[in-house]
Image (cartoon, coloured by chain):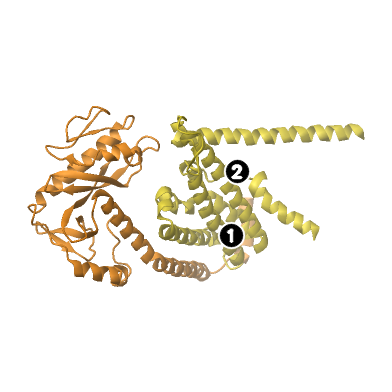
Chain colours: A orange, B yellow
């Protein structure tokens, strides 16, 4: 009680007006907003280029021999080539060699791992119905055990020329005998099986929607060059959506 | 002159050692335990926190007479959050790999009580040079703690330091050290060490005082 009495006059004497309080916070918020927007704009293009480069590198990794790529989107049940970015798009990527001949698809797929969602990109050659490469885009698996799904070269090599029919199966390490089986990682069975399940889910989702082998969308060279020259980020106003990774 | 130098030195060194934010004040435990599974992550987190703490302390000390005390906490948070966002975007643009490793813990620097604590306890009451010294000292202490914890965990848990293999291929990594329990174990042992040093110092001081008293 005595505390309150003592504080009241002291506080009351230099009590700033409500306007001053609101004003201070408004100015602070305004300056902060301007700084944040400036930094956002300054880093926007670099961040976008980083993401695009990361994706390009991943596609080149899972599809050996690829020199060009273009994005395909599913529209009205058909895969069409797309050069613009759309909101919530779920693309797959088509890879072509230097002469523009179709090589295969790079299909992103994601699902729960041991700790968090694992995002996988894998290369698929429709002619032979083979998975030809696998790359982990994002994961938070246990360091030292689960992270072997991308750190262990022997495990990654499992996904080179892997048959997708009837479906991919993870078996105990060293017991791989069929072309649709992979060796799981000892001590990280759940993570290994998660990768396999994610790829099987990707196959279930996409394989029926892919066009007949031989009638893949052709490589549109002119568009690609234009897109590269204009560096996409400058063609579209900043604030357009990031690459859907 | 000598006196003010001594004082400046004191403000700086108290954060690095005597009042080390991690080992003595036990502040900022969330990033401390979460991202120190390797030395490089510790360095990145330490530097990010360093930048945010020093910049925030500068502005809080600069603006302390403009900020009414009723809204000071909100203003501090706005200042801190601004610099955290700057760090977040900058890391994402310049070193995307590091940003990926640190992930959600960069935005969480806003909630590091070490930073807000220094604004409330020191920067808002002291001159700019003193606030800077305090911030640099505290941030260095935090960086030191993160790097040593990250280094120890990486050496034991992966047999590497900063990515370089130390023990050759025959070393069986002590995986638990880079898992969360390893963080708690290592931090516990380091706190034990710091407390032991402190106890010893106290005893020595007491003995010294007793000896001097006897001499009189």
A26 shown above or below A159: below
Task: Classify mark 1: residues with Cα within 10 Å, few (<14), some (14-19) or many (20+).
Answer: many
User: Badge 2 is on which residue?
Assistant: B25
Provide the chain ID for the residue under circle 1: B
B186 or B74: nearer the viewer = B186
Q: Are marks 1 and 2 on the same chain?
A: yes
Residue B136 percent coordinates (x, y): 62, 55
> At numbered mark 1, what does the secondary structure look like: helix, strand or loop?
helix
Whether label 1 touches label 2, CB < 8 Å: no
Task: Classify mark 2: residues with Cα within 10 Å, few (<14), some (14-19) or many (20+).
Answer: few
Task: Look at 59% across and 36% down and name the residue there.
Answer: B191
Provide the chain ID for the residue under circle 2: B
For marks 1 and 2 on the same chain, the one whose residue lies earlier in the sequence = 2
A27 shown above or below A106: below
Tag shown at residue A28: none
A114 shown above or below A132: above
Residue A164 percent coordinates (x, y): 15, 40
Seen in the image, is B63 located left or right of residue A185? right
Seen in the image, is B191 located left or right of residue A173? right
Residue B86 percent coordinates (x, y): 46, 61
Seen in the image, is B89 located left or right of residue B211? left
Q: Can residue B80 be seen in this view?
A: yes
Residue B142 percent coordinates (x, y): 57, 48
- Name the residue furthest right: B216
User: Badge 1 is on which residue?
Assistant: B57
Task: Look at 59% across and 66% down and name the residue there.
Answer: B63
A136 shown above or below A7: above
């Amino acid at each position: 009680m005595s505390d309150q009495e003592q504080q009241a006059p002291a506080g009351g004497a230099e009590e700033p007006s409500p306007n001053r309080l609101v004003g201070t916070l408004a100015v602070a918020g305004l300056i902060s907003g301007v700084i944040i927007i400036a930094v956002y704009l300054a880093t926007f293009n670099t961040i976008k280029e980083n993401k695009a480069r990361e994706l390009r590198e991943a596609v080149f990794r899972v599809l050996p021999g690829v020199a060009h790529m273009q994005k395909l989107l599913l529209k009205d049940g058909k895969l069409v080539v797309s050069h613009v970015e759309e909101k919530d798009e779920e693309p797959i990527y088509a890879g072509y060699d230097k002469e523009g001949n179709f090589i295969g698809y790079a299909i992103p797929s994601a699902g729960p791992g041991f700790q968090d969602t694992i995002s996988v990109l894998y290369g698929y050659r429709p002619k032979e119905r083979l998975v030809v490469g696998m790359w982990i885009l994002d994961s938070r698996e246990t360091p030292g055990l689960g992270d072997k799904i991308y750190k262990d070269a022997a495990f990654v090599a499992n996904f080179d020329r892997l048959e997708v029919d009837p479906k991919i199966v993870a078996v105990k390490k060293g017991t791989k005998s069929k072309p649709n089986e992979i060796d799981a990682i000892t001590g990280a069975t759940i993570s290994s099986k998660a990768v396999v399940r994610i790829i099987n889910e990707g196959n279930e989702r996409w394989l029926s929607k892919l066009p007949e082998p031989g009638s893949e969308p052709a490589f549109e060279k002119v568009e690609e060059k234009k897109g590269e020259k204009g560096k996409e980020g400058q063609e579209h106003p900043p604030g357009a959506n990031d690459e859907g990774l | 002159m000598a006196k003010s130098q001594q004082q400046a030195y004191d403000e700086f060194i108290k954060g690095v050692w005597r009042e080390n934010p991690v080992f003595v004040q036990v502040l900022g435990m969330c990033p401390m335990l979460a991202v120190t599974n390797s030395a490089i992550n510790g360095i990145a987190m330490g530097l990010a926190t360093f930048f945010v703490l020093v910049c925030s302390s500068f502005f809080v000390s600069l603006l302390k007479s403009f900020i009414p005390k009723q809204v000071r906490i909100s203003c501090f948070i706005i200042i801190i959050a601004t610099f955290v966002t700057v760090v977040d975007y900058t890391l994402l643009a310049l070193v995307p790999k590091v940003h990926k490793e640190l992930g959600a813990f960069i935005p969480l620097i806003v909630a590091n009580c070490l930073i807000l604590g220094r604004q409330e306890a020191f920067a808002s009451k002291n001159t700019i040079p003193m606030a800077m010294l305090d911030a640099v000292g505290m941030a260095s202490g935090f960086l030191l703690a993160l790097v040593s914890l990250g280094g120890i965990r990486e050496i034991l848990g992966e047999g590497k330091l900063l990515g370089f293999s130390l023990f050759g291929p025959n070393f069986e990594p002590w995986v638990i050290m880079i898992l969360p329990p390893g963080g708690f174990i290592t931090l516990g042992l380091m706190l034990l060490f710091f407390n032991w040093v402190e106890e010893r110092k106290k005893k020595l001081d007491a003995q010294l005082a007793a000896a001097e008293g006897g001499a009189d």
